[in-house]
């Protein structure tokens, strides 16, 4: 074999071919000019560990990939493919690969295989030849095979790259055509180069041919000018810029003259020396309608909240009675000021809730509201709780601690049960109210605070002042704006509103279905005096839900015994109601018997001159309705 002559002839036989035709020409010419029995080229798919022959020439004709396709275990090709090695066996190839039956069957003696590798040194195919006689010139054979293996690998790589590009283009095309937004490619003058299906539909179901159309024909004049300015800016830029989002609402017009608001994303794409521009239109008409609807609903919600607020004035306070409305009006009046408020009211009337309402509606609502129960703090610790202490100020003061007034700085402090304050602390509290300053326990350093004070008590502070148990000057400082909360017994139907609220709350927490209050329940709740006020009502309702029989409240068990009144027959209201139900059943039996007698007398005729309806003096339709309601039917003969 003359290497130079063989190389020239093989090159002449393959130079004009590409793709599959190149592989076919290559193996045919290799077999012919290298004077070998077989030559083939394969593709190896690493992801699937699969080998596939691209062209196979054997004994002067095309054939399928005998022993090549699929699994190559135990064959010479395995060494080339799996190990990525060049393999040259001059003689006795069948002896080295005894597990390959095709070698013995075809009588092959010699084998040469060269792998193809990509940039990552992964094998993706190989070129090989076999012959029935030994190959003597190893150097010449390998040089020739390497040259054409390189050419074959490059061609296979090109085919794969084209396939990937084609798949990518197909995927992009599918994405483009299935995109919900209108996508349009234009030149610098807004001449349309390409439109996707959504754009055709948005602009009036245009035909696929858009040549000669200008996007300006589908935009308002101001929108056209605006886009041209943006395109000019992008065109003048020397480097590619990020897509420009146009949040301003542009006006697009379809071929039918129907306009719609749109948002646009604009980007530039360069291909060689020319540039085009991609516009993505999004019809935001539905969004604008939704936003307008949301705005309208928000306004309506605000209006309804204000309406509810006008009835109850303060969130979380339930009731519409005149005494409560009077208090809530006063809450509105004083909340906007910084005046000290003194809340009077029986235990359980909601003094803390009113204090919270004053804070939440004041200019201090962003600040803290600190609650102090003056009756719950031991007398020896109350000064420390109010004003804080230094480390080591007293036994047990292992570290510095801020008091409640410091914590409430910038906000509100609520002093509940203020009448319980000892006399010495009353004087210090008066100083805080007058000057806004105090000294923590164990410190000589004066602290300044800006705190609004709201106090509450269930006692008669004037009587406490007269008895010498409460400082008069502190009383006047606290009661700049006095508020007196009505007792629950004085709030009329508010008892029912609150009871319904507590029933729903307790039933939801316990996961039990409870029927609404019956008329009897409402009467009993309104008639009771409620010495414990709202707190007692909440406890009663919770007991009634716990002991409910089925889905019906059990007020007999929940209300205090003094509230369960007896009638003249010695029955409770619940028992009397049961008795009235039994009487109603008896009445139904009486009516059923009366109708049966009339029907029997009339021969079970309902209407007509001799019918039962005539005897009873009622319309036949009424009689039929009563028969159905009472389940009364004609007996069988």
Image (cartoon, helix red, strand yellow):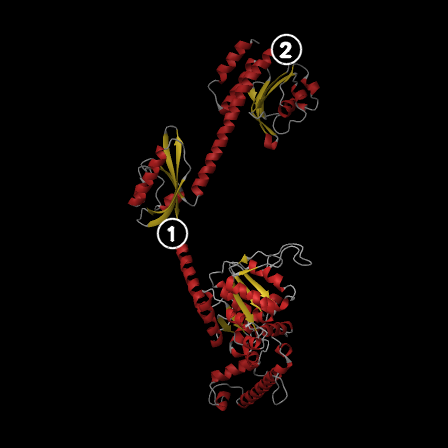
Toward which corner of the image does residue 438 lie, by quadrant? bottom right
515 w.r.t. 162: above or below: below
- Which labelled disc corresponds to residue 136? 2
Dot 1 surroundings within 10 Å: few (below 14), some, or many (20 or more)? Answer: some
Which residue bears the numbered disc 1? 285
Picture coordinates of residue 52, whole percent (x, y): 58, 28
In the depicted view, which residue is nearer to us: 600 or 351?
Answer: 351
In the depicted view, which residue is nearer to us: 464 or 631?
Answer: 464
Q: Residue furthest left?
A: 221
The N terminus appears in which quarter of the rendering? top right
Picture coordinates of residue 251, whole percent (x, y): 33, 47
224 w.r.t. 44: above or below: below
Q: How many marks?
A: 2
Toward which corner of the image does residue 404 lie, by quadrant? bottom right
Q: Secondary structure at mark 1?
A: helix
Is label 2 in contact with label 1 (beta carbons under 8 Å)? Answer: no
Picture coordinates of residue 442, whole percent (x, y): 63, 58
In the depicted view, which residue is nearer to us: 11 or 213?
Answer: 213
Name the residue at 54% across, 19% down: 150
- Which labelled disc corresponds to residue 106? none
Mark 2 vs mark 1, foreground winner is: 1
292 w.r.t. 193: above or below: below
Q: Residue furthest front?
A: 444
Name the residue at 50% across, 27% down: 159
Toward which corner of the image does residue 173 lie, by quadrant? top left
Quick check: can you spot residue 96? yes
The CA span between labels 2 and 1 is 81 Å
Picture coordinates of residue 562, whole percent (x, y): 63, 82
The C terminus appears in which quarter of the rendering? bottom right
Q: Secondary structure at mark 2?
A: loop
Q: Which sits earlier in the primary sequence, circle 2 or circle 1?
A: 2
Dot 2 surroundings within 10 Å: few (below 14), some, or many (20 or more)? Answer: few
């Amino acid at each position: 074999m003359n290497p130079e002559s063989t190389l020239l002839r093989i090159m002449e036989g393959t130079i004009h071919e590409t793709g599959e035709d190149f592989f076919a020409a290559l193996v045919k010419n290799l077999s012919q000019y290298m004077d070998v029995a077989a030559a083939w080229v394969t593709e190896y798919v690493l992801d699937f560990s699969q080998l596939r022959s691209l062209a196979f020439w054997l004994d002067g004709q095309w054939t399928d990939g005998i022993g090549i396709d699929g699994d190559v275990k135990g064959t010479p090709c395995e060494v080339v493919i799996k190990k990525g090695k060049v393999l040259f066996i001059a003689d006795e190839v069948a002896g080295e690969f005894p597990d390959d039956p095709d070698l013995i069957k075809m009588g092959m003696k010699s084998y040469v295989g060269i792998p193809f590798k990509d940039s990552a040194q992964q094998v993706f195919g190989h070129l090989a030849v076999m012959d029935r006689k030994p190959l003597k010139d190893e150097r010449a054979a390998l040089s020739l095979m390497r040259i054409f293996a390189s050419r074959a690998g490059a061609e296979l790589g090109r085919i794969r790259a084209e396939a990937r590009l084609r798949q990518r283009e197909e995927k992009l095309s599918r994405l483009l055509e299935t995109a919900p937004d209108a996508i349009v490619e234009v030149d610098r003058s807004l001449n349309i180069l390409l439109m996707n299906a959504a754009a055709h539909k948005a602009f009036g179901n245009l035909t696929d041919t858009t040549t000669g159309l200008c996007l300006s024909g589908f935009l308002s004049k101001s929108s056209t000018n605006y886009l041209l300015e943006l395109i000019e800016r992008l065109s003048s830029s020397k480097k590619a810029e990020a897509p420009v989002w146009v949040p301003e609402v542009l006006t697009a017009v379809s071929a039918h003259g129907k306009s719609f608001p749109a948002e646009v994303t604009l980007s530039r794409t360069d291909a060689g020396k020319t540039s085009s521009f991609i516009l993505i239109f999004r019809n935001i008409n539905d969004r604008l309608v939704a936003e307008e609807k949301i705005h309208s609903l928000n306004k309506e919600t605000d209006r309804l909240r204000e309406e509810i607020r006008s009835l109850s004035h303060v969130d979380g306070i339930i009731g519409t009675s005149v005494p409560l409305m009077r208090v809530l009006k006063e809450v509105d009046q004083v909340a906007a000021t910084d005046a000290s408020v003194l809340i009077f009211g029986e235990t359980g009337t909601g003094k803390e809730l009113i204090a919270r309402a004053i804070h939440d509606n004041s200019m201090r609502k962003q600040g803290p509201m600190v609650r102090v129960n003056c009756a719950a703090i031991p007398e020896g610790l109350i000064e420390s709780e109010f004003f804080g202490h230094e480390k080591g100020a007293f036994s047990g003061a292992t570290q510095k601690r801020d008091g409640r007034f410091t914590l409430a700085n910038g906000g509100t402090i609520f002093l509940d049960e203020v009448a319980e304050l000892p006399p010495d602390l009353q004087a210090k509290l008066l100083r805080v109210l007058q000057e806004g300053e105090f000294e923590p326990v164990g410190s000589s350093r004066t602290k300044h605070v800006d705190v609004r004070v709201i106090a509450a008590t269930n006692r008669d502070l004037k009587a406490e002042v007269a008895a010498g148990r409460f400082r008069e000057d502190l009383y006047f400082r606290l009661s700049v704006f006095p508020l007196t909360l009505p007792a629950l017994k004085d709030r009329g139907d508010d008892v029912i509103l609150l009871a319904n609220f507590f029933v729903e709350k307790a039933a939801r927490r316990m996961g039990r279905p409870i029927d609404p209050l019956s008329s009897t329940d409402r009467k009993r709740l309104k008639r009771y005096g409620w010495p414990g006020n709202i707190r007692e009502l909440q406890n009663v309702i919770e007991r009634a839900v716990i002991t409910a029989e089925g889905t019906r409240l059990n007020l007999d068990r929940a209300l205090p015994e003094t509230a369960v009144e007896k009638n003249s027959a010695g029955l409770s209201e619940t028992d009397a109601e049961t008795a009235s139900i039994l009487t109603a059943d008896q009445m139904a039996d009486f009516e059923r018997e009366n109708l049966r007698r009339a029907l029997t007398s009339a021969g079970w005729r309902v209407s007509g001159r001799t019918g039962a309806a005539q005897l009873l003096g009622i319309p036949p339709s009424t009689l039929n309705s009563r028969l159905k309601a009472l389940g009364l039917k004609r007996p069988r003969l």
